[in-house]
Amino acid sequence: MPMGMVLQPAQKQQLNARLVQQMKLLQMNGQELENYIAKAVEENPVLDFPEASEEWQEQGPSFRQASGPARAADDDPLPNPVENAHQEKHTLEEVLIRQLGCLTLSQKEERLAYYLIGTLDAAGYWKGDLKKTAGLFGVKEDAARRLLTRIQHFEPTGVAAGSLKECLLLQLEPETEENSLARRIIEEGLELLADNRIPELASRFGVTRKEILVGRDLIRTLDPKPGALYRQENPTVFLHEDAFVECGPQGLKLTVYNPWGGQLVLNRHYLSIAEETDSEKIRAYLKEQIGKAKALQHLIKGRYETLRLILEALVTHEEAFFRWGPGHKAPLRLADLAEETGMAVSTVSRALQNKVIACRWGAYEAGDFLMGTAGGDGETAGTTDEQIELAIRHIVDGEDKRHPLSDQAICDCLKKEGIVLARRTVNKYRTKLGIPGKAARKSWE
């Protein structure tokens, strides 16, 4: 077969370093962008910060500037900072170690006790292998179990348990006539109680429903996560807003967070050095840094313009929500925003990633506004998931708890409101909302 060469046109996309950096900046939220710029300024001597604009930090959106009293007359009184000055929040580990000082332990036992306390999870449970752990510290398993039992009797009650049942039983020690039935329910019928199967529990234990309800009420006073009340070691993560929307007489106003006004300045001192120096090495270095600085300026400006256009399209599409609040979101897809802005779907997706939009109704991730409809297969078209969830929640909240509604009954109620869904679809939404089934919602009072 003869060999030859053929010219054939083809499209090929190449990602250069500039395009990669542009996509990276677009995906960043406001806090990440601040950190990125701060690092760039630190590494590039030619870059400098302008005087920071205080408008965003100090003024903020008008809906946060309360014109009237911020607190109602019947609100709980604010805490007294002077009275609370001596109070210090501790971690669970600190609280338990303080109590550990009251015990007389050998050196090995003390090391083991510190390990047991230090390996409790955030809920206050210890789920390790006691036999293996005892061997690692050169302690007999029986001695390790006794030490764990002593820790389990520290405050908060129920700490260092290995399971939910053990945690609840520890909180009901010692066993008395008043709590004996509650202990039996925990030991033998906790799953039935979770499913609200009160008659079956009464039949199993040979008692009345009323007695089961008394035991249930006692169990409800217990804390299934005794360690959750204490301060955690990990830092608090604060929500950083990338944009906020205000409602005014002339329509909606969108403000996109733009650190330092989107402007980075070039250091005049280094610019003059680059022009006047006789050293080729210094001139080449500063020329390279000036090029990087100008490129970053251009990228930051491009990111702001892209994000502003996309968020303006989103806000315009969701005007009903920003004016009247939850329950008024309109169906919205990435393709819709891409068509309105003339940008690629991938660009819109990157721009909305990790972004938070604040408004008078709260702060929402930009991705929360992307939703389709529940239409298709003969079901109601044009109804958003949010509207369906709110309708189901409203129906369940208003039902007679002595005769709760089945999924089919909820379907019938939704149909009266103009929302036609199959029973399996209602079950899907109910489960997503964390609403238990009919039997679990029944009140036996």
Image: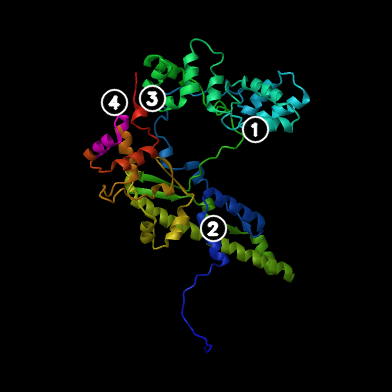
Q: Position of residue 304 (x, y in %)?
A: 48, 56
Label 4–label 3 contact, CB within 8 A: no
Element carrying mark 2: helix
Count residues near mark 3 (Cα–Cα under 10 Å), then give few for <14, some for 14-19, many for 20+: some
**Gap between marks 4 and 1 measured at Cα:** 46 Å
Q: Name the residue under label 4.
A: 403
In-image side of 142 versus 376 (left or right): right
What's the magenta region?
A: 396-414
Element carrying mark 1: loop
Label 2–label 3 contact, CB within 8 A: no
Q: Name the residue under label 3.
A: 197
In-image side of 232 versus 404 (left or right): right
Q: Residue 129 carries which label?
A: 1
Q: Nearer the viewer, mark 2 or mark 3?
A: 3
**Gap between marks 2 and 4 measured at Cα:** 55 Å
Q: Residue 24 carries which label?
A: 2
Under mark 2, the amino acid is Lys
Element carrying mark 4: loop
Element carrying mark 3: loop
Q: Can residue 103 be seen in this view?
A: yes
**Gap between marks 2 and 3 measured at Cα:** 54 Å
Q: Is residue 249 visible?
A: no
